[in-house]
Amino acid sequence: MSGLTEAQIASFKENGYLVLPDYLSQPELSSLLTETNKLLDEFPLESHPLTQFTTEEDTADHVGDDYFLTSGDKVRFFFEPDAFSSEPDPLTGRAALMKPKNRAVNKIGHSLHTLSPPFKAVSLNERNAAVARSLGFVDPRVLQSMVICKQPSIGGAVPSHRDSEFLYTNPPSAVGWWYALQDAGPKNGTLGMYKGSQTGKKGGHIARRFVRKDGGGTEFIENQGPSLPKGMEEEKSSEPSDEDLEILDIKAGSLVLIHGNVLHKSEKNTSPNSRYAYTFHVIEGAEGWEYDERNWLQPPAEGFSKLEA
Ligand code: AKG
């Protein structure tokens, strides 16, 4: 397997992301959509704690419950806050969904790459191992796989962030693999990338981190460790601005590689069309990089999945 071309690697290094159209075959794409719909149709609502998902900084407590924190090696379902009525269900006293459950889920996570055969097949394969090697990984490990649904009308915005804030290694090494399972454009909350913002000269430092709080829950803290990947220059910094923002138009089946230090976001989906995407992250597992013990997602006993040929 050949991995990325020199031109693709250069483009990734310059922009902090790379779009690879038609990365998934039609059968692969269909298998992932079928599996996503099956998971959404079949999960039981009655026993679900109705956990909602948001990455808004001031509401980090919403995701701090056990259902979220123990989902790193499971397949779990997190709801859109806007799928609920402001009043509880008068019969059960529980939060009341205003949408059918398959249209109410924000995301499914976080171990589809080990537990779902179709997702495992497109994640842990030789082709991705070759791409990881092209990006310089020595012992690439896969973690935090999820389907992000961006449901019609209510699919929540993802505020600007850098992925290494969430999956911090010392020094930073995370890269996101983000597959469009449906077309993603400006109307249905596509990815917005701040071009070049992964570099030291464009504020690409990991200044904050999302961690487990002592005593339970999660919080953002200041990063005290290295803030740029090995080999990246510390340069005088200017912050990314709206001029750097590229709103991507991505066809279903494309793969977007996202540098762990690049600033990116997505807007709320106010359109009638969903925008399913599958994503996982790769971190460096080799000696010389340390996965942080305060990260929200902790490795299973056997360690994170090896991405190998
Ligand atoms: C990420 O995977 O880091 C994202 O920001 C994804 C946002 C989205 O899919 O809307």
Image (tube, helix red, strand yellow):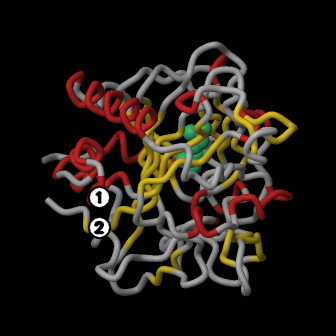
Q: Residue at x 49, y 74 (%)?
A: 230
Q: Is residue 190 left or right of residue 161?
A: left
Q: Spot the residue most to the top.
A: 272
Q: Is residue 212 above or below residue 77?
A: below
Q: Which residue is mark 2?
A: 305
Q: Quadrant of residue 20?
A: top left
At which x and y percent is residue 37?
40, 30
Please tell me the numbered disc located at residue 240.
none
Q: Which residue is mark 1?
A: 114
- The quadrant of the image that shows the C terminus is bottom left
At which x and y percent is residue 172?
53, 71
Ligand 1: which quarter?
top right
At which x and y percent is residue 34?
32, 28
Q: Residue at x 58, y 75 (%)?
A: 295
Q: Amino acid at mark 1?
A: Thr
Q: Is residue 176 left or right of residue 150?
A: left
Q: Tell me the crowding category of disc 1: few under 14, some 14 to 19, or many 20 or more residues within 10 angstroms, Cα based.
A: many
Residues under numbered marks 2 and 1 in contact, where contact means CB atoms less than 8 Å apart: yes
Q: Nearer the viewer, residue 26 or 115?
A: 115
Q: Tell me the crowding category of disc 2: few under 14, some 14 to 19, or many 20 or more residues within 10 angstroms, Cα based.
A: some
Q: Along the polypeptide, which appears first: circle 2 or circle 1?
A: 1
Q: Quadrant of residue 201?
A: bottom right
At which x and y percent is residue 296?
59, 71
Q: Nearer the viewer, residue 309 or 296?
A: 296
Q: Residue at x 47, y 52 (%)?
A: 109
Element type at mark 2: strand
Q: Nearer the viewer, residue 7 or 132?
A: 132
Q: Amino acid at mark 2?
A: Ser
Element type at mark 1: helix
Marks 2 and 1 sit apart, C-alpha to C-alpha, by: 8 Å
Q: Is residue 42 above or below residue 174?
A: above
Of badges 2 and 1, the one in the foreground is 1
